[in-house]
Amino acid sequence: MAVEVASPLFLLVMAKITAPIISRTNNTTPAPATAPEIVASSPDGFREAVEEGLGRAARTLRGITGLEVLGKRVKVERGLIVEYRVDMKITFVLE
């Protein structure tokens, strides 16, 4: 089954902090914080959508230590998958 690609890469950053942010614990060790949720997509697959979202986040956030994929969806047009979408959170260390 061929996958028809009809739309360009799509990325949306939702400015929503999802957890309290603490900059330091015991005033010595950087503490991880949860970043805004990222919604990214690719016409090529879920992995590519995750990589696109991470690349976009890395342009504005420093100290990224991980990410969590919260959900996956596909966009379908005329019975064919045209876009793979992922919802994810980026974890980073505050300076």
Image (cartoon, helix red, strand yellow):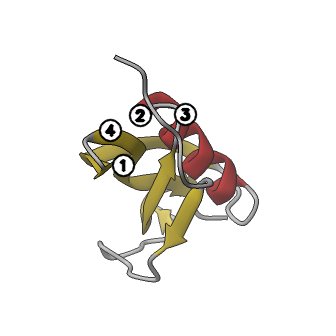
Q: Earlier in the sequence, mark 1 or mark 3?
A: 3
56 relative to 45, above or below: below
Identify the residue at horizontal 48%, vertical 51% (top origin).
41
Q: Which mark is residue 48?
A: 3
Q: Contact, CB < 8 Å: mark 2 with mark 1?
A: yes
Q: CA distance from mark 4 to mark 2?
A: 15 Å
Label 1 amino acid? Val
Identify the residue at horizontal 38%, vertical 49% (top origin).
85
Q: Earlier in the sequence, mark 4 or mark 3?
A: 3
- SS state under label 4: strand
- Is 57 on the left or on the right of 60, as rendered? left
Please name which of the two marks, 1 or 4, marks the residue nearer to the observer: 4
Q: Quadrant of the N terminus?
A: top left
Q: CA distance from mark 1 to mark 3?
A: 10 Å
- Is 16 on the left or on the right of 62, as rendered? left
Q: Contact, CB < 8 Å: mark 1 with mark 4?
A: no
Q: Earlier in the sequence, mark 4 or mark 2?
A: 2
Question: Could you say where residue 73 lies in the image, as x and y percent from the top left?
Answer: 26, 48
Kindly tell me whether residue 55 is visible in this rendering: yes
Q: Which mark is residue 46?
A: 2
Q: Which mark is residue 80?
A: 4
Depth check, front residue: 63 or 56 = 56
Q: Which residue position holds label 1?
A: 86
- Is 25 on the left or on the right of 53, as rendered? left
Question: Could you say where residue 6 lies in the image, as x and y percent from the top left?
Answer: 53, 49
Q: Contact, CB < 8 Å: mark 1 with mark 3?
A: no
